[in-house]
Image (cartoon, coloured by chain):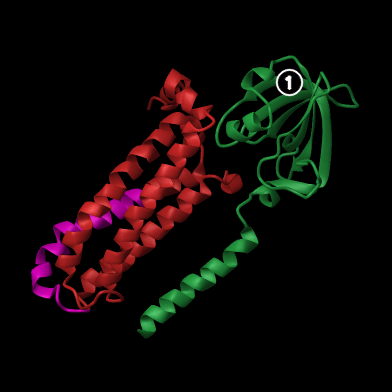
Amino acid sequence: MKKTTLVLFAAGVLCAVQPAQAHHAFAAEYDSDKPVTLSGTLTKMDWVNPHGWLYMDTKQPDGTVKHWTIETSGPNQMSRRGLKKTDFKAGMSVTVKGYQGIKDPALANGRTLVLADGRSFYIGSVGGPNDGADR
Amino acid sequence: MPSIIPALQWLEGLAWTTAIRESSWGHPIIETAHVATTVVFAGLVIIMDLRLVGLAFTDAPVADIQRRLFPWQMAGLVPSMATGLLLCCVDPLRYYGNVMFRVKLALLAVAGINALAFHWTTYRTAGRWDEDPNGTATARRAGAVSLLLWFSVIVSGRLIAYNWFN
Protein backbone atom coordinates (compact mmCIF):
# COMPACT_ATOMS: atom_id res chain seq x y z
CA MET A 1 0.00 0.00 0.00
CA LYS A 2 2.85 2.33 0.88
CA LYS A 3 4.41 1.73 -2.54
CA THR A 4 1.16 2.53 -4.31
CA THR A 5 0.82 5.77 -2.35
CA LEU A 6 4.36 6.70 -3.35
CA VAL A 7 3.66 6.05 -7.04
CA LEU A 8 0.45 8.11 -6.89
CA PHE A 9 2.30 10.92 -5.13
CA ALA A 10 5.03 10.96 -7.79
CA ALA A 11 2.38 11.05 -10.53
CA GLY A 12 0.66 13.93 -8.74
CA VAL A 13 3.89 15.92 -8.56
CA LEU A 14 4.49 15.37 -12.29
CA CYS A 15 0.98 16.60 -13.10
CA ALA A 16 1.43 19.65 -10.88
CA VAL A 17 4.65 20.64 -12.68
CA GLN A 18 3.00 20.39 -16.10
CA PRO A 19 0.86 23.60 -16.13
CA ALA A 20 4.00 25.77 -15.91
CA GLN A 21 4.90 24.59 -19.43
CA ALA A 22 1.23 24.73 -20.45
CA HIS A 23 0.67 23.24 -23.86
CA HIS A 24 2.16 25.94 -26.01
CA ALA A 25 5.56 26.32 -27.53
CA PHE A 26 5.16 30.06 -28.08
CA ALA A 27 7.56 31.16 -25.34
CA ALA A 28 10.12 28.56 -26.40
CA GLU A 29 10.21 29.69 -30.01
CA TYR A 30 8.94 33.27 -30.19
CA ASP A 31 9.77 36.50 -28.39
CA SER A 32 6.66 38.31 -27.12
CA ASP A 33 8.83 41.42 -26.67
CA LYS A 34 9.58 41.54 -30.39
CA PRO A 35 6.35 42.34 -32.22
CA VAL A 36 6.82 42.75 -35.98
CA THR A 37 4.64 44.19 -38.70
CA LEU A 38 5.67 42.86 -42.10
CA SER A 39 4.45 44.21 -45.40
CA GLY A 40 5.57 42.52 -48.57
CA THR A 41 4.94 39.89 -51.16
CA LEU A 42 3.62 36.41 -50.46
CA THR A 43 5.85 33.81 -52.11
CA LYS A 44 4.15 30.62 -50.87
CA MET A 45 1.53 29.32 -48.46
CA ASP A 46 1.67 25.84 -46.94
CA TRP A 47 -1.93 25.10 -45.97
CA VAL A 48 -0.98 22.16 -43.75
CA ASN A 49 -1.57 20.42 -40.43
CA PRO A 50 -0.89 20.86 -37.65
CA HIS A 51 0.09 24.48 -38.41
CA GLY A 52 0.32 26.36 -41.67
CA TRP A 53 3.20 28.43 -42.98
CA LEU A 54 3.31 31.70 -44.91
CA TYR A 55 6.45 32.61 -46.81
CA MET A 56 6.89 36.27 -47.70
CA ASP A 57 9.55 38.70 -48.90
CA THR A 58 9.96 42.14 -47.37
CA LYS A 59 12.18 44.97 -48.51
CA GLN A 60 14.72 46.01 -45.91
CA PRO A 61 15.64 49.68 -45.33
CA ASP A 62 19.00 48.97 -47.02
CA GLY A 63 17.27 47.71 -50.17
CA THR A 64 17.91 44.00 -49.63
CA VAL A 65 15.09 41.47 -49.52
CA LYS A 66 14.39 39.42 -46.40
CA HIS A 67 12.69 36.03 -46.71
CA TRP A 68 10.30 35.48 -43.81
CA THR A 69 8.69 32.25 -42.64
CA ILE A 70 5.50 32.81 -40.65
CA GLU A 71 3.69 30.19 -38.61
CA THR A 72 -0.10 30.27 -38.81
CA SER A 73 -2.84 28.10 -37.38
CA GLY A 74 -3.92 24.92 -39.14
CA PRO A 75 -6.48 24.40 -41.93
CA ASN A 76 -9.39 23.82 -39.54
CA GLN A 77 -8.96 27.07 -37.59
CA MET A 78 -8.04 29.10 -40.69
CA SER A 79 -11.21 27.88 -42.44
CA ARG A 80 -13.39 28.75 -39.48
CA ARG A 81 -11.93 32.25 -39.44
CA GLY A 82 -13.05 32.68 -43.03
CA LEU A 83 -9.88 31.91 -44.97
CA LYS A 84 -9.52 29.44 -47.83
CA LYS A 85 -6.42 27.80 -49.29
CA THR A 86 -7.20 29.59 -52.57
CA ASP A 87 -7.09 33.01 -50.85
CA PHE A 88 -3.31 32.70 -50.92
CA LYS A 89 -1.64 33.40 -54.24
CA ALA A 90 2.05 33.82 -54.81
CA GLY A 91 2.84 37.43 -55.66
CA MET A 92 0.00 39.00 -53.71
CA SER A 93 0.66 41.82 -51.26
CA VAL A 94 0.11 40.97 -47.62
CA THR A 95 0.68 42.51 -44.22
CA VAL A 96 1.33 40.24 -41.27
CA LYS A 97 1.55 41.23 -37.64
CA GLY A 98 3.22 38.80 -35.31
CA TYR A 99 6.18 38.05 -33.09
CA GLN A 100 9.73 37.34 -34.15
CA GLY A 101 11.49 34.03 -33.50
CA ILE A 102 14.07 33.79 -30.72
CA LYS A 103 16.64 31.63 -32.52
CA ASP A 104 15.68 32.48 -36.11
CA PRO A 105 15.23 36.21 -36.85
CA ALA A 106 13.54 35.41 -40.18
CA LEU A 107 10.85 33.36 -38.42
CA ALA A 108 7.69 34.85 -36.95
CA ASN A 109 4.52 33.69 -35.28
CA GLY A 110 1.65 35.24 -37.24
CA ARG A 111 -1.17 36.89 -35.32
CA THR A 112 -3.02 39.11 -37.79
CA LEU A 113 -3.12 38.84 -41.56
CA VAL A 114 -4.29 41.78 -43.65
CA LEU A 115 -5.00 41.11 -47.32
CA ALA A 116 -4.62 43.66 -50.11
CA ASP A 117 -8.40 44.25 -50.13
CA GLY A 118 -8.24 45.32 -46.49
CA ARG A 119 -9.82 42.20 -44.98
CA SER A 120 -8.17 41.22 -41.72
CA PHE A 121 -7.94 37.75 -40.15
CA TYR A 122 -6.66 36.29 -36.92
CA ILE A 123 -4.12 33.59 -37.85
CA GLY A 124 -2.62 32.93 -34.39
CA SER A 125 -1.62 29.38 -33.54
CA VAL A 126 0.41 28.45 -30.49
CA GLY A 127 -0.73 30.74 -27.72
CA GLY A 128 1.11 34.01 -27.53
CA PRO A 129 0.63 37.22 -25.59
CA ASN A 130 -2.82 38.58 -24.86
CA ASP A 131 -2.57 41.31 -27.49
CA GLY A 132 -6.18 41.35 -28.63
CA ALA A 133 -5.34 39.96 -32.08
CA ASP A 134 -7.84 37.15 -31.53
CA ARG A 135 -10.79 39.49 -30.97
CA MET B 1 24.19 4.95 -49.87
CA PRO B 2 21.21 6.33 -51.82
CA SER B 3 19.29 9.05 -50.03
CA ILE B 4 15.83 8.33 -48.69
CA ILE B 5 14.78 11.95 -49.34
CA PRO B 6 13.51 11.48 -52.94
CA ALA B 7 11.26 8.63 -51.77
CA LEU B 8 9.89 10.82 -48.97
CA GLN B 9 9.31 13.68 -51.42
CA TRP B 10 7.41 11.30 -53.68
CA LEU B 11 5.29 10.15 -50.72
CA GLU B 12 4.60 13.75 -49.68
CA GLY B 13 3.53 14.64 -53.22
CA LEU B 14 0.87 11.94 -53.56
CA ALA B 15 -2.72 13.14 -53.86
CA TRP B 16 -4.01 11.28 -50.79
CA THR B 17 -1.17 12.30 -48.46
CA THR B 18 -1.56 15.90 -49.58
CA ALA B 19 -5.32 15.76 -49.05
CA ILE B 20 -4.91 14.55 -45.45
CA ARG B 21 -2.08 17.01 -44.75
CA GLU B 22 -4.27 19.90 -45.89
CA SER B 23 -7.54 18.63 -44.41
CA SER B 24 -9.71 20.42 -41.88
CA TRP B 25 -10.84 17.27 -40.11
CA GLY B 26 -8.95 14.24 -41.45
CA HIS B 27 -5.62 15.03 -39.86
CA PRO B 28 -7.00 16.02 -36.43
CA ILE B 29 -9.17 12.86 -36.39
CA ILE B 30 -6.21 10.59 -37.23
CA GLU B 31 -4.07 12.32 -34.61
CA THR B 32 -6.78 11.92 -31.99
CA ALA B 33 -7.28 8.25 -32.89
CA HIS B 34 -3.51 7.75 -32.59
CA VAL B 35 -3.47 9.19 -29.08
CA ALA B 36 -6.65 7.40 -27.98
CA THR B 37 -5.52 3.97 -29.15
CA THR B 38 -2.02 4.55 -27.75
CA VAL B 39 -3.63 5.25 -24.39
CA VAL B 40 -5.45 1.91 -24.52
CA PHE B 41 -2.25 0.05 -25.36
CA ALA B 42 0.06 1.88 -22.97
CA GLY B 43 -2.44 1.77 -20.11
CA LEU B 44 -2.72 -2.01 -20.35
CA VAL B 45 1.04 -2.46 -20.72
CA ILE B 46 1.52 -0.41 -17.57
CA ILE B 47 -0.88 -2.70 -15.67
CA MET B 48 1.19 -5.72 -16.72
CA ASP B 49 4.45 -3.95 -15.87
CA LEU B 50 3.21 -2.92 -12.42
CA ARG B 51 2.35 -6.57 -11.75
CA LEU B 52 5.81 -7.67 -12.87
CA VAL B 53 7.48 -5.08 -10.68
CA GLY B 54 5.34 -6.27 -7.78
CA LEU B 55 3.38 -3.05 -7.22
CA ALA B 56 -0.11 -4.02 -8.39
CA PHE B 57 -2.42 -7.06 -8.52
CA THR B 58 0.15 -9.14 -6.69
CA ASP B 59 -2.57 -11.60 -5.60
CA ALA B 60 -3.10 -12.69 -9.22
CA PRO B 61 -0.71 -14.87 -11.24
CA VAL B 62 1.34 -13.00 -13.85
CA ALA B 63 0.34 -15.40 -16.63
CA ASP B 64 -3.33 -14.93 -15.79
CA ILE B 65 -3.08 -11.13 -16.04
CA GLN B 66 -1.06 -11.29 -19.24
CA ARG B 67 -3.43 -13.75 -20.91
CA ARG B 68 -6.42 -11.52 -20.14
CA LEU B 69 -4.75 -8.25 -21.11
CA PHE B 70 -2.99 -9.33 -24.29
CA PRO B 71 -5.97 -9.17 -26.75
CA TRP B 72 -6.84 -5.69 -25.47
CA GLN B 73 -3.22 -4.57 -25.65
CA MET B 74 -3.24 -5.61 -29.31
CA ALA B 75 -6.61 -3.90 -29.82
CA GLY B 76 -4.79 -0.72 -28.83
CA LEU B 77 -1.44 -1.40 -30.48
CA VAL B 78 -2.63 -2.29 -33.99
CA PRO B 79 -4.70 0.87 -34.66
CA SER B 80 -2.08 2.94 -32.82
CA MET B 81 0.64 1.71 -35.19
CA ALA B 82 -1.64 2.07 -38.23
CA THR B 83 -2.57 5.68 -37.42
CA GLY B 84 1.04 6.45 -36.48
CA LEU B 85 2.29 5.12 -39.80
CA LEU B 86 -0.41 7.10 -41.59
CA LEU B 87 0.69 10.32 -39.88
CA CYS B 88 4.30 9.64 -41.00
CA CYS B 89 3.16 9.08 -44.60
CA VAL B 90 1.20 12.30 -44.63
CA ASP B 91 4.14 14.53 -43.69
CA PRO B 92 7.26 12.37 -44.17
CA LEU B 93 9.87 15.09 -44.59
CA ARG B 94 8.82 16.88 -41.44
CA TYR B 95 9.09 13.72 -39.36
CA TYR B 96 12.33 12.66 -41.02
CA GLY B 97 13.97 15.92 -39.98
CA ASN B 98 12.54 15.90 -36.46
CA VAL B 99 15.02 14.89 -33.76
CA MET B 100 12.35 13.75 -31.31
CA PHE B 101 10.74 11.56 -33.97
CA ARG B 102 14.04 9.72 -34.39
CA VAL B 103 14.41 9.39 -30.63
CA LYS B 104 10.88 7.99 -30.46
CA LEU B 105 11.55 5.44 -33.21
CA ALA B 106 14.72 4.29 -31.47
CA LEU B 107 12.89 3.98 -28.13
CA LEU B 108 10.05 2.07 -29.82
CA ALA B 109 12.56 -0.39 -31.24
CA VAL B 110 14.16 -0.92 -27.82
CA ALA B 111 10.75 -1.25 -26.12
CA GLY B 112 9.72 -3.80 -28.75
CA ILE B 113 12.91 -5.80 -28.29
CA ASN B 114 12.45 -5.70 -24.50
CA ALA B 115 8.88 -7.01 -24.82
CA LEU B 116 9.85 -9.80 -27.25
CA ALA B 117 12.90 -10.78 -25.21
CA PHE B 118 10.73 -11.02 -22.10
CA HIS B 119 8.12 -13.17 -23.82
CA TRP B 120 10.67 -15.47 -25.43
CA THR B 121 12.80 -15.98 -22.33
CA THR B 122 11.65 -14.98 -18.84
CA TYR B 123 7.92 -15.39 -19.50
CA ARG B 124 8.43 -18.98 -20.72
CA THR B 125 9.23 -19.94 -17.15
CA ALA B 126 6.34 -17.93 -15.70
CA GLY B 127 4.54 -21.08 -14.57
CA ARG B 128 7.21 -21.53 -11.90
CA TRP B 129 7.03 -18.05 -10.42
CA ASP B 130 3.87 -16.34 -11.58
CA GLU B 131 2.01 -16.75 -8.32
CA ASP B 132 4.86 -15.18 -6.40
CA PRO B 133 3.92 -11.53 -5.71
CA ASN B 134 7.51 -10.51 -6.40
CA GLY B 135 8.15 -12.76 -9.40
CA THR B 136 11.84 -13.06 -10.25
CA ALA B 137 14.51 -10.40 -10.39
CA THR B 138 14.63 -10.69 -14.19
CA ALA B 139 10.86 -10.27 -14.45
CA ARG B 140 10.94 -7.26 -12.11
CA ARG B 141 13.71 -5.72 -14.20
CA ALA B 142 11.82 -6.37 -17.44
CA GLY B 143 8.75 -4.68 -15.98
CA ALA B 144 10.68 -1.66 -14.74
CA VAL B 145 12.53 -1.25 -18.05
CA SER B 146 9.24 -1.56 -19.93
CA LEU B 147 7.61 1.13 -17.75
CA LEU B 148 10.53 3.49 -18.34
CA LEU B 149 10.66 2.80 -22.09
CA TRP B 150 6.94 3.24 -22.81
CA PHE B 151 6.86 6.38 -20.70
CA SER B 152 9.81 7.72 -22.73
CA VAL B 153 8.14 6.76 -26.01
CA ILE B 154 5.07 8.79 -25.02
CA VAL B 155 7.14 11.78 -23.90
CA SER B 156 9.29 11.81 -27.04
CA GLY B 157 6.16 11.36 -29.17
CA ARG B 158 4.54 14.38 -27.58
CA LEU B 159 7.73 16.41 -28.04
CA ILE B 160 7.68 15.84 -31.82
CA ALA B 161 5.21 18.73 -31.96
CA TYR B 162 7.77 21.13 -30.49
CA ASN B 163 10.79 22.13 -32.56
CA TRP B 164 12.88 22.81 -29.46
CA PHE B 165 15.68 20.45 -30.41
CA ASN B 166 15.87 20.84 -34.18
| Chain designation of label 1 | A
Residue depicted at x 64% and y 23%: A84
Percent position of residue B36, x then y: 40, 49
Quadrant housing residue A56? top right
Q: Is residue B15 left or right of residue B56?
A: right
Q: Along the line of sight, which residue is nearer the eye, B163 or A47?
A: A47
Image: magenta residue range: B106-133
Residue depicted at x 76% and y 16%: A92
User: Is residue A98 shown in magenta?
Assistant: no
Amino acid type of the residue that numbered disc 1 sits on in the rendered structure: Leu
User: In the image as oriented, which residue stretches furthest toward the right?
Assistant: A61
Give the colour chain B carries in the figure: red
Residue depicted at x 27% and y 76%: B54
Question: Which quadrant of the figure contains the C terminus of chain A?
Answer: top right
Q: Is residue A20 above or below residue B4?
A: below
Q: Is residue B36 left or right of residue A111?
A: left
Q: Along the line of sight, which residue is nearer the eye, A30 or A81?
A: A81
Percent position of residue A90, x then y: 70, 15
Q: Is residue B140 above or below residue B108?
A: below
Q: Secondary structure at mark 1?
A: strand
Q: Along the line of sight, which residue is nearer the eye, B96 or B81?
A: B81
Percent position of residue A34, x then y: 82, 44
Give the colour chain A carries in the figure: green
User: Is residue B117 shown in magenta?
Assistant: yes
Q: Is residue A98 left or right of residue B62?
A: right
Which is the main secondary structure of the residues drawn in magenta? helix
Name the residue beneath numbered marker 1: A42
Question: Which quadrant of the figure contains the N terminus of chain A?
Answer: bottom left
Viewer can see residue A129: yes
Viewer can see residue B106: no
